[in-house]
Amino acid sequence: MPDKPRVKAPRQRTAPTDPDVARKRRLALLVGVGGALLVALVVAAIVLGFTGGGGPDEKQVRADLTAAGCTLQSFPGVSRQHISDAAARPKEWNSFPPTSGPHYVTPAIYGFYTEPVELARILHGLEHGGAYILYGSKAPADTVSKLREIYDRDPRGLVVSPLPELGDKIALGAWTSENPGGGDLGTGHLAKCTQVDKKAFDTFIKAFRGRGPEGVPLDLLKPGGT
């Protein structure tokens, strides 16, 4: 039986590519990649805005404070309730000075004070991501000038104020959250020292400022604002 003739399959023809179509495809690809990069940059900017660009961890804070003769304590957040009396000192506060808890509805303006400021006002600023440095009436004579130097280097979100009840102590406080802008109560951080140590104080501020439960970016915590 004779072999059947082999018939080659017809060659598939590819439609010619329109140069404009190709350019549009390349442009769409570039736009897609660029958009993804933009989203990543925005997310990074937001995260850095909350954290102040990253900084030392709590282990480093404790090491620097210990070397300076200071103590550091952490306290569980207890409340984010607003109260109507700026002079009140609610029983829910679990540290002194307070590092979390009920606070006055209007925050203290960030700044450097020469007269005491109500703690319930200062505490509201911590919820936003601020930090405080408070000093007692028996603190070393050169305390104010040294604290002014620390404040002037980067005053964002800082309240520096006398608190006579601290005696010879200086207190640093902050209120942080692992989920800024969420609903958690966060953690309070309180350091106490008997003298100013610029390295230790800077480490505390860099680690904890800008991480408040309310999630306000650090760059929005302007001196003269809330």
Image (tube, helix red, strand yellow):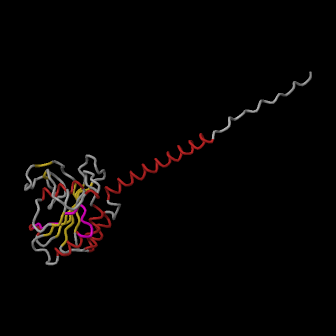
Displayed quadrant of residue 120: bottom left
Give yes or no for residue 187 being in the magenta stretch.
no
Q: In this view, does 6 lie above or below 41?
A: above
Percent coordinates x, y for residue 28 in the rendering: 53, 43
Displayed quadrant of residue 3: top right
Q: In which quarter of the image is the C terminus?
A: bottom left
- What residue is rendered at 14% in x and 52% in y? 106
Between 149 and 195, the one lying in front of the other is: 149
What are the residue bounds of the magenta stretch? 152-163
Q: Residue furthest top?
A: 1
Between 166 and 161, the one lying in front of the other is: 161
Q: In this view, does 198 lie above or below 124?
A: below
Percent coordinates x, y for residue 13 in the rendering: 72, 33
Q: Quadrant of the N terminus?
A: top right
Q: Residue furthest right?
A: 1
- What residue is rendered at 35% in x and 60% in y? 53
Give yes or no for residue 156 being in the magenta stretch.
yes
Instruction: Judge from the rendering whether residue 8 lies leftward or rightward of residue 163; answer left or right.
Output: right
Between 86 and 194, the one lying in front of the other is: 86
Percent coordinates x, y for residue 171 in the rendering: 18, 67
Q: Which residue lies furthest to the front in this view?
A: 20
Looking at the image, how many numbered discs can be counted on the residues?
0
Percent coordinates x, y for residue 149 in the rendering: 23, 73
